[in-house]
Amino acid sequence: MNTILGLGFILIAGLFSARLINKIKFPSVTAYLLLGIIIGPSLFGLVSEEILSASGLISNIVLGMIAFSIGQNFSLDNFHKIGKSVIWISVLEACGAWLLVTLAFLLILKQPFYIALLFGALSSATAPAATVMIIRQYRAKGIFTDTLLGVVAIDDAWCLIIFAISLAISQAIYSHMVATFFLIRVFLNSIWNIIGAFILGSIIAILSSYFSRFIRTQAEFLIFTLGFILLSIGIAIWLHLSVLLANMFLGAFLVNIDKSSFSSFDVLKTVDSPLFLLFFVLAGANLEIGLLPRLGLIGSVYLVFRVIGKITGAGLGAHISNASKNIRKYLGLGLVPQAGVALGCALVAKSDFPNIGSMIFTTIVATTVIYELIGPICTKIALKRAGEIAID
Amino acid sequence: MSKEVITVKRSTTLRQLLEIFADFHLFPLVPVVEEDGRLVGIVSFRNLIDVFSPYRQEILKTVPFLDDQEEDIFKAELTKDIGDLVVVEDIMETKFVSLQEDTTLEEAFKLMKLHLKEEFPVTDKTGKLVGKIGIFDIIRRVFQEKGVI
């Protein structure tokens, strides 16, 4: 199958498989992933080598767009709106999973620190699509539901920050394993990665805000916004900075310095759907099924400790912010799904760490499929125990 | 620019909003103002549709990969008391484009094309609403300047 035919097939098959899976109340993301696994080289081999090799390019673009979009959360106005409870719970559930999975990989699986740190960072993400779908399906209503929606909405922002910091530290450890002044180098590399991304994001935001006055039509605006996002991604890669952080800072700066910047985020929605579809299908296609039997223990530890970390962290956050008893007890259970951001970050880890990348990526894809299947059930149980859904 | 603008307050209920515009064929852009006249939001027909989708919250707009499920308004179940329970503050947009009263017609027209909108609220320098400008105001003025009318 030639590349263009393959892309056409993926888009059409993705669209209809999503429709199909929506009927049994699973999010489209699950359909895209399963489709990717089925047509990928591990099973039917319907995806050409050219398309598979474009996975890195597509995931970088998609992640850049996602990070840019998530950046708009960081406005003062938004923080006032979402409230203390959501901030405490989201920060601590993300950090809880990060810490617990890192420790479990270090102490139980005896993995090197940089691998443990990467798995820990990946575990901090959640998947709002599955959670929102269950809330819609059962027409859940109340404070618990509102808090859960707020937490899943902002969680990916914390995940991107946690992953960018962990990636910088892991890269520094990995590349300076035998260097002298080891700790100093690790520290300087990590700081450069983060501060450099901050400076790059802010400069691109100022330039984008200035040049936006020359834009006349919606079509030009789309090209303009995409252009600046790609510039930010490209320069970040060129300077060895965090693509995720650079684009998140770009979005965050823009939303704070330019009152009409919300249009930049809205206009991207007109093109993101096919790119997201391709991203997930290719993520599924990159799964190396042959590796799965060897990853049983790693996958199990990841599955269990991520959930414990989320439940414990969410409970602690709810306790600190004086949230209700139901939120303290059950909110963590609503945070089990994992999908897009974790997969995207795993693809980054795969390309940055060729020796262990396949192991990380395959673990994340396999656990994502499991989480996407059991996650909605856990969310339903949480909503039911919190007394916010009436129908069974 | 039209200075006679129907405005609503944050506390205006959905029922009142629907009654105010009962005789309109198209729901216009409705400015939401504070007691002192400061413009704080807008309500458009899109926001009325959102009443049928209770989870289309503003915060979820930043979430990637959400399945965009358009609610079927003919099948959606709404309770009768929603007309009094939902107020303008729940559905209004707080991120919107507004023009200053000294904005030129060319600039206003350019912004309408850029944002794909047909009307904008107009404020003074302190943020108080002074009127509303629509695409027909601009086109009519151009016809006038060219001597057609």
Image (cartoon, coloured by chain):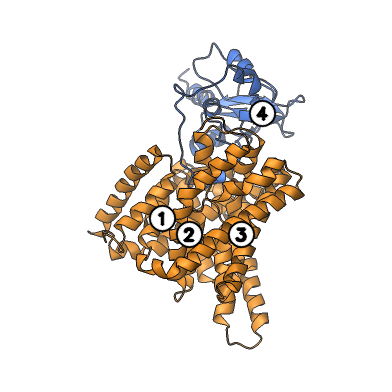
Q: In the rendering, what colour is chain A?
A: orange
Tag 1: residue type?
Phe
The span from disc 2 to disc 1 (Cα, nearest Å) is 8 Å
State the residue at coordinates (32%, 61%): A51
Query: Which-is-in-front pick, marks 3 and 2?
Result: 3
Q: How far across and down, in percent of the image, does residue A42 sit?
A: 31, 64
The span from disc 1 to disc 4 (Cα, nearest Å) is 37 Å
Tag 2: residue type?
Gly
Q: Is residue A50 above or below residue B142?
A: below
Question: Are the two marked residues, 2 and 1, in contact with CB atoms closer than 8 angstroms?
Answer: yes
Viewer-nearest residue: A365 or B11: A365
> For residue B23, which quarter of the picture?
top right
The span from disc 4 to disc 3 (Cα, nearest Å) is 36 Å
Viewer-nearest residue: A45 or A215: A45
Give the residue number, with chain letter if any, for mark 4: B89
Do marks 1 and 3 both belong to one polypeptide chain?
yes
Tag 4: residue type?
Glu
Which chain is indicated by disc 4? B
Which chain is indicated by disc 1? A
Give the residue number, with chain letter if any, for mark 1: A279
Give the residue number, with chain letter if any, for mark 2: A344
Secondary-structure class at tag 1: helix
Give the residue number, with chain letter if any, for mark 3: A97
